[in-house]
Image (cartoon, helix red, strand yellow):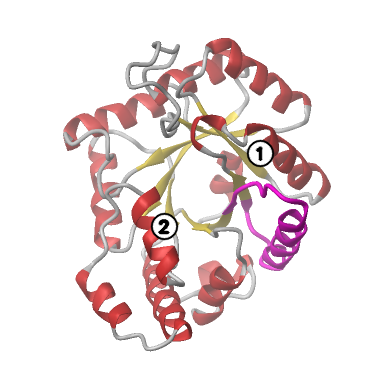
């Protein structure tokens, strides 16, 4: 099923993101994680990969396994930085042949091994990737990224909206946001999208802070992420790792509660391949199954 159809049928959806493990042991652990998540009946899951497509083959195999064997609608991340049109067409053809019908179209992070002045590729922006997907497979479902706190590569917030609308006009069905820790940033982003004429559903990306290493990793991976002082004060009061995890889960739970109360189209959990934090967040606000979403007050 296309994600656009799922979002159209359900006022609010829950979804989860994973990354492909690199070892057999980690792969088995991830399957257990996904099994835990399945108890929530997620609307869909997504699978990402490393900068420049460094885990591309692993991503393909995991996407196909989840989609076809576990019977959960699965979105395959696809980045175009350092890629040619032929590269992308080859990947799309493989996904289509395997029954995958949903793509998250991203420009992607520049790999560290890329020269300072790389040879120009075939994609200046993610909108070019969206256009190619729609041209190759018009029925393919496409999601794109949004940045509530601002795109790190585009300090001009007006131009940022122009680029985002170009992705939607090229054929994107929905927007999934980068993680954020202050819902005011999300609501402001949502309002600016509507003012720009962007009417597709906007899914809110949430990642709970469960340890100092998670905090540092978020700061490194999510360039420009803003950590509210109130959150940092609470984290600084933590005496143990368990205290810190509880603070992070409580903060994220309050974010999700508020988003649901304000009729967000969807909540997308960035899991770091762990099920417990997301499940604890849902339990904290009284959700044990996705069917309860619109009963939360």
- Would you say residue 291 is visible in this rendering? yes
Residue 155 coordinates in the image, percent (x, y):
18, 36
Query: Mark 2 and mark 1: span between their CA atoms?
Result: 21 Å
Magenta residues, as a range?
17-44
Question: In the rendered image, which quarter is residue 186 located in?
Answer: bottom left
Q: Nearer the viewer, mark 2 or mark 1?
A: 2
**Magenta stretch: includes residue 27:** yes
What residue is drawn where x is 61% and y is 59%? 273
Depicted 295 relative to depicted 227: above or below: below
Upstream in sequence: badge 2 or badge 1? 1
Q: Which of 155/44 is in front?
A: 155
Question: In the rendered image, which quarter is residue 181 located in?
Answer: bottom left
Q: Which residue is mark 2?
A: 217
Q: Quadrant of the C terminus?
A: bottom left
SS state under label 1: helix
Residue 31 coordinates in the image, percent (x, y):
75, 58
- Disc assigned to residue 187: none
- Would you say residue 260 is visible in this rendering? no
Residue 121 coordinates in the image, percent (x, y):
44, 13
What residue is drawn where x is 27% and y is 49%? 224
Q: Which residue is mark 1?
A: 59
What residue is drawn where x is 49% and y is 75%? 296
Depicted 56 relative to depicted 271: above or below: above
**Magenta stretch: includes residue 114:** no
């Amino acid at each position: 099923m296309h994600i656009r159809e799922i979002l159209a049928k359900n006022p609010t959806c829950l979804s989860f993101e994973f990354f492909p493990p690199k070892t057999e042991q980690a792969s088995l652990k991830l399957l257990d994680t996904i099994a835990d998540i399945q108890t929530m009946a997620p609307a869909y899951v997504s699978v990402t990969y490393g900068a420049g497509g460094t885990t591309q083959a692993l991503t393909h195999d995991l996407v196909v396994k989840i989609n076809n064997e576990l019977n959960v609608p699965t979105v395959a991340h696809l980045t175009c930085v350092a890629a040619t049109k032929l590269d992308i067409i080859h990947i799309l053809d493989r996904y289509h042949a395997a029954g995958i019908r949903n793509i998250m179209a991203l420009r992607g992070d520049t790999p560290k091994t890329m020269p300072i002045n790389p040879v120009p590729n075939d994609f200046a922006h993610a909108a070019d990737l969206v256009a190619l997907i729609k041209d190759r497979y018009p029925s393919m479902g496409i999601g794109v990224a949004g940045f509530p706190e601002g795109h790190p590569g585009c300090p001009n917030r007006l131009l940022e909206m122009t680029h985002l609308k170009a992705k939607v006009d090229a054929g994107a069905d929905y927007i999934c946001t980068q993680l954020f820790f202050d819902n005011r940033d999300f609501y402001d982003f949502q309002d600016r999208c509507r003012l720009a004429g962007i009417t597709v559903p906007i899914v809110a990306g949430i990642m709970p802070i469960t340890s100092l290493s998670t905090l540092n990793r978020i700061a490194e991976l999510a360039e420009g992420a803003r950590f509210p002082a109130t959150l940092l004060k609470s984290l600084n009061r933590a005496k143990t790792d368990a205290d810190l995890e509880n603070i992070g889960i409580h903060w994220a739970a309050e974010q999700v509660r508020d988003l649901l109360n304000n009729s967000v189209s969807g909540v997308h959990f960035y899991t770091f391949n762990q099920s417990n934090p997301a499940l604890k967040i849902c339990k904290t606000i009284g959700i044990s199954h996705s069917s309860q979403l619109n009963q939360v007050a």
